[in-house]
Amino acid sequence: MQVHPLTCALGAELTGINLADAVRDDGLFAEIRSLLLQHKVLFLRDQDFSRAEHVAFARRFGELEDHPVAGSDPEHPGLVRIYKTPDQPNDRYENAWHSDTTWREAPQFGAVLRCVECPPVGGDTMWANMALAYERLPAHIKEQIADLRARHSIEASFGAAMPIEKRLALKAQYPDAEHPVVRTHPDTGEKILYVNAFATHFTNYHTAARVRFGQDANPGAADLLRYLISQAYIPEYQVRWRWAPNSVAIWDNTATQHYAVMDYPPCHRKMERAGIIGSKPF
């Protein structure tokens, strides 16, 4: 196996291996997991494996989960189908910078995403290193956010376009989760800036130490949250990957955010993702 770093911030391409072999090879899998924690996102090309092998490889990291809105492959639970087709004129947006499922009490540890079909040009995905984003924050910002916590909502994101009854049912099933704004990585011990597009507001900002008068809480808290979320937009923290059929990305969802670029004309973009259950942030 050869390892080719792609940027100074994060990301490495692996060549000379077949991920399906790591289902049975403990040594190979351990090496891949170690490289994932080091580079935060790994990329491979020409991985022509089956859906069953996709699920089996991802399950080596932990148990998989389905998504309450995006559909899963009926024969392979935990394999979410992210399909964009030309006959979806009202569903042409992709997303904002985010970490998957932070609206859960225990968000995903990571994911294994395989390209089934993609446009000839466009449809790239970008990742940002949120440990590096935290490390390079000004010292006074680090001090200000050290004890802050934030709400993350599926209702305000996936639920926003739903009829109100369906949206409220979704929120009842998945109440807004509260997480620390600065999370500690359970494996590496790194401090990670942990707010993204699912974060709606801080829950403990309105204290005497931060607020002289009520008006200081708003827009003060909202401006700070926007500033923190915008750190993922900085190119020096990012890597960008151009897809081709049978390309694969494996990422540490704890330490990164990602963004699927919707810059292509109406055509097919079919991706399949196995999301790995994680732990409660601390």
Image (cartoon, grey):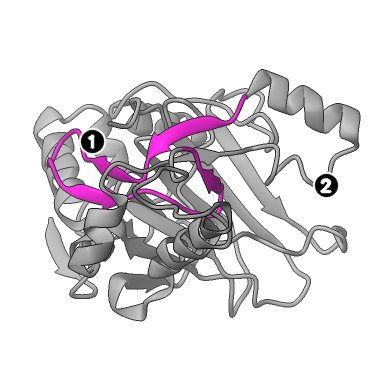
Q: Residue at x 22, y 55 (%)?
A: 143
User: Does dot 2 land on a helix, a strand or a loop?
Assistant: loop
- In this rendering, position of residue 68 left or right of residue 112: right
Please state which of residues 12 and 55 is positioned toward the viewer in this rendering: 12
Q: Which residue is painted at 19% across and 33% down in the image? A: 186
Q: Residue at x 12, y 41 (%)?
A: 189
Q: Is residue 168 above or below residue 155?
A: above
Q: Is residue 115 left or right of residue 129?
A: right
Q: Tell me what residue is drawn at x 37 percent, y 48 percent.
A: 194
| In the image: residue 217, left or right of residue 239 | right
Specify whether residue 253 is in view.
yes
Q: Where is the C terminus found, in terms of image quarters?
A: top left
* Vertical side of 204 occupied by 99: above or below: below
Q: Quadrant of residue 279?
A: top left
Q: Which residue is mark 2?
A: 161
User: Of all residues shown, which one is farthest toward the front?
Assistant: 213
- Residue 197 within the segment the image draws in magenta: yes
Indicate the position of residue 85 as horizontal and vertical percent values: 77, 59
Mark earlier in primary sequence (1, 2): 1
Q: Left or right: where does residue 114 sit relative to residue 12?
A: right
Which segment is the magenta one?
Answer: 175-203
Instruction: Judge whether residue 199 is colored magenta.
Output: yes
- Estimate the spatial distance between the alpha carbons at disc 1 and disc 2, rounded to whole Å: 40 Å
Give the label on residue 22, or none. 1
Q: Depth-wise, is mark 1 or mark 2 nearer the camera?
A: 2
Above or below for 129 versus 278? below
Where is residue 160 drawn, in percent x and y? 78, 45
Tag 1's secondary structure? helix
